[in-house]
Image: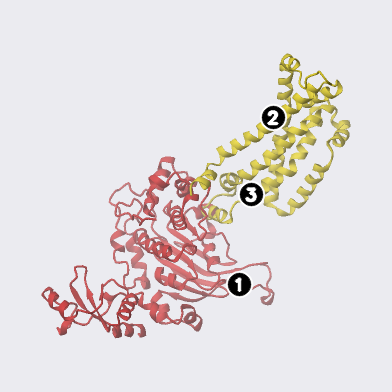
Chain colours: A yellow, B red
Amino acid sequence: MTGRPLVDWGWVVGHLDDIALATLQHLGIAALAVGAGFAVSFGLALWSVRDRRVYGPITAISGILYTIPSLALFAVLVPFTGLSVVTVEIPLVAYTLLILVRNIVAGFDAVPADVLEAANGMGYTRGQRLLQVELPLAIPLIIAGLRLASVSTIGLVTVGSLIGDAFGGLGVLIKDGIAAFFPTKIYVGAALSVALAFGADIAFIRLQRALTPWARARISGR
Amino acid sequence: MSEPVLPQAGLRFGPPPDAGRDARDNAGPAARDNPRPDAQDNARPDPRPDAQPDARRAATVEFEHVTKVYGPADRRTAEARPPAAVSDLSFVVPAGNICVLVGPSGCGKTTSLKMVNRLIEPTSGRILIDGVDIATEEVTALRRRIGYVIQQVGLFPHLTIGENVAVVPRLLGWSPVRQRERADELLALVGLDPARDRDRYPAVLSGGERQRVGVARALAADPPVMLMDEPFGAVDPIVRDRLQNEFLRLQDELAKTILFVTHDVDEAIKLGDLVAVMAQGGVLAQFGPPEEILASPASDFVARFVGADRGLKRLSLSRVADLELDPVGGRGPGRGPGPDTAGTTAAATPDLPVVEPETTLKDALSILLDAGAEAGLVVDRAGRPLGLVRVETITARMRT
């Protein structure tokens, strides 16, 4: 290894388009997983809020899913879904459920009882109350869940490279780097994956600020 | 917090023509010694013809044998039934009256209140608003025309103060411009500054201000009926007293039918045109104007609940002007000497404490006792003596 630089910048400059493509693919796979996971989790969370009895089983099942290693899950899924993007997305979506369901339920639980009573007493319908009162007030905890889920998903996308070069995003760079004893690819893949995770986190923080102007009033308004 | 500015005139949503008059005429027993003498004048119709397109007059609220039993409703045997939260409650609150439901905790007063906007459904019996059984109405529509104020206020933290006030108008589909105008009008009415507070969030408000916004929000769609569940219970005594006084002044202008829940007898007596004393199990122990409750409690329970000092409490319902005053300086009897006696009286009664005709008898007695005087000089606004008020005259009033 002596004499060789840690990162071969010449290769990086020569393969900017490949790197950009892998990064976009990585982001796309992660976004799809978090988006689908959020949709499923939101439904499960609403069900849990309406009927508390299902909350225990839902968290238990999503907890068990969370403990299954992704490699094992791939092995189980490949016979059914083949070497496809679906095989990659199913574990990624499954891993978001635990975090997202818990946070969304916690968000709805955090809506103060007096606010709900006032909303009922003033004649909100159930749907209006949910969309106009409960959902906005649950946003801080929902977004906290999305931040955790997106960061962990962005890290996990790399294992999708085991299914195929079209499904691993930056993981493909890392895999190739390991196979070819070419550290530059490993460093670039890892660094960009970390950068994506940071970027997603910051984006969600911004989103939360934009959606909850009243939370700032609470801090600065004293 | 600065002293709130109360609106002087030009309310756009006062009761429609004759509503205030109806309210007071129907008041019956509530027409007590008129502690709010300007009520009728303020209830005059707004001269602007377009001022109140959808103003409604205050409504009569009637409980008819209302019972609420929690738990399985299908149990028929008496011994298997859980105790009732509200038992066979019947009373009528005439339009424009404040009826205070008061009693110890667990007496079903809040349950009774929540049955009016159907947050709780009665097990049996009916509640009528202006003769219409509320069970026949669509529940959200019913709630949107009943103002609702709770102790914890329940302001929406994610909406601005102006948006909070305009919640029911928005649910009713008013135009944004009209919602905003209405919110500004009501913020001013409850003593907040629309320009400053409209676009802020509730988190910046003090407890008293929050409760004012809560009242403004309940009034927003000009509901004929208001339900208030211990609205002043969570603020300190000084703020509470001020909110109560503002509330009474507001009611003079608005003449709503108000059902008001409290556990505080003094508050009930101060605010109520009618007081419903409730006992454990949701039984109506006594219903009537406050002076009647104080003067002749219907049972030991009521007597104990209103307190051993009910004689003193009665004094706060009357004012010095209600008494037969003794003449000043040995002149003939009558309600005040001529103006020419002003100078001589002051000289003749140099050490007497001075009270005003509007002073409550309770405060007057306190002033006299503090001063160690047997009598006090009653003077009008201009300082002219009207007569003497004696300790024994006041204490005699306690016993009748």
Residue at x 69% of width, y 35% of height? A35
Among the two numbered marks 3 and 2 on one chain, the one whose residue lies closer to the N terminus: 3
Q: Label 1 belongs to which residue? A: B84
Instruction: Give the CA separation, mark 2 to mark 1.
Output: 64 Å
Labels 3 and 2 in the same subunit: yes
- Label tally: 3
Chain hosting mark 1: B
Picture quadrant of residue A188: top right
Residue A195 numbered tag: 2
Instruction: Give the CA separation, mark 3 to mark 2.
Output: 31 Å
Instruction: Give the CA separation, mark 1 to mark 3.
Output: 33 Å
- In the rendered image, is residue A125 in sight? yes
Classify residue A189 as left or right of residue B8. right
Q: Label 3: state its secondary structure.
A: helix
Q: Is residue B332 above or below residue A136?
A: below
Q: Label 3 belongs to which residue? A: A108
Counting from the top left corner in percent of width and height, residue A58 is at 76, 48
Counting from the top left corner in percent of width and height, residue A157 is at 77, 31
Asked if labels 3 and 1 touch by Cβ distance under 8 angstroms, the answer is: no
Q: Label 1: state its secondary structure.
A: strand
Chain hosting mark 2: A
Classify residue B368 as left or right of residue B308. left
Q: 10 Å neighbourhood of mark 3: few (<14), some, or many (≥20)?
A: many
Mark 1, mark 3: which one is toward the viewer?
3
Q: Is residue B384 above or below residue A206?
A: below
Residue at x 61% of width, y 46% of height? A138
Q: Is residue A17 above or below residue B113?
A: above
Amino acid at pointer 3 = Phe
